Image (spheres, helix red, strand yellow):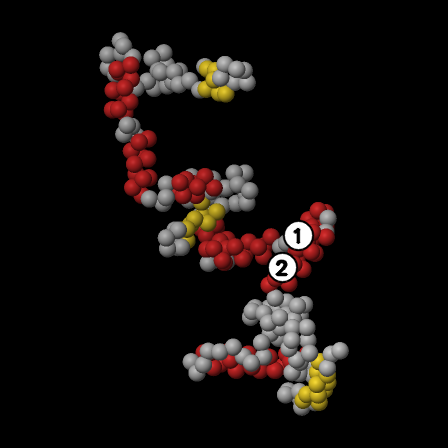
Amino acid sequence: MTQLQTRQCPQCGTAFQAKQAANGRTKEHCSKKCYLKAWSQNNKKWREDTESGVRTQVPKVAPLCKQCGKPKTWEKDTTTKHGNRFRCVPCRTALCKKRYYSMSVEERREQHLKNYDPEKNRRNVLKRIFGITPEQWDEMHKRQGGVCWMCGHDGKGIHRYDRLLVDHCHSTGRVRGLLCHHCNAGLGHFKDDPILLQKAIDYLNGGNESIISAVLHSDNEGDGDGSVPDSCSDATAPIFRTWSKASSDSGFQRLR
């Protein structure tokens, strides 16, 4: 049989009958209102003392989980009056999983669409990753003429966002402008390195022509100048064959 103890609430001074909880602790306050009020006062004093450097210790009234009754970590929640979550992390995780798996696929999709706000999500992503607002994005888009700075494409039809993407430096985080998906991915593949990009320009301008000419001159007899063919359809051009895994037991077969 649980023994009751007559105690006096340190917050309001009211005498009440306190019984021992399942976790072995005895209630110190007469009501939850007094408990939260005392917790708020201790938490405020603890924060003030911590900021001033007087002491760094946990308040006397520790937050308790509403479900299991055990002390829990400090977690900020602006939806509650006292600014702290009611449940600890394990209890909240178990409750969320129970609610999620109890719903059907249609209910989950409906709940997602109900809480999903595209504009709010876009604003949060721009602010969190790039440190800009949608208004600043619109201003950059207007000053660039609504097209990619590199290729002049409007960015529609080549990416799931169907708009220009924000390009930024991965080392410093500085925003550089708006690019289409192809140009933005291309800079990423080249690791934002101007030296690699300059080598790619030299390569496209025929920087590797001497090696190719030497190889083709040694392979193609009768080609006196050793020049590279202008097109693969040329008679002197080498045939680049592609291979594919065949379904028969012969292994690989030549396509052309």
In the rendered image, the quadrant that contains the N terminus is bottom right
**Where in the figure is residue 169, as x and y percent of width and height?**
39, 51
Between residues 97 and 130, which one lies in front from this camera angle?
97
Against 244, residue 44 (above or below) is below
- Say whether marks 1 and 2 touch (CB < 8 Å): no
Amino acid type, label 1:
His
Query: Dot 1, crowdedness within 10 Å: few (<14), some or many (≥20)?
Result: few
> Viewer-nearest of labels 1 and 2?
2
Residue 112: mark: 1
Does 143 sit left or right of 209 as displayed? right
Q: Residue at x 64, y 77 (%)?
A: 25
**Quarter of the view holding residue 15:** bottom right
Amino acid type, label 2:
Thr
**Where in the figure is residue 230, as x and y percent of width and height?**
34, 19
Between residues 64 and 255, which one lies in front from this camera angle?
64
In the rendered image, the quadrant that contains the C terminus is top left
Local secondary structure at mark 1: helix
**Where in the figure is residue 205, as x and y percent of width and height?**
30, 30
Local secondary structure at mark 2: helix
Q: Residue at x 67, y 68 (%)?
A: 67
Against 184, residue 248 (above or below) is above
Between residues 238 and 17, which one lies in front from this camera angle?
17
Between residues 217 and 86, which one lies in front from this camera angle?
86
Q: Which residue in the rendered view is the most extreme toward the right? A: 1
Residue 33 seen from this side: no
Q: Which residue is mark 2?
A: 93
Does 91 sit left or right of 44 as displayed? right
Does 232 sit left or right of 133 as displayed? left
Residue 25 seen from this side: yes
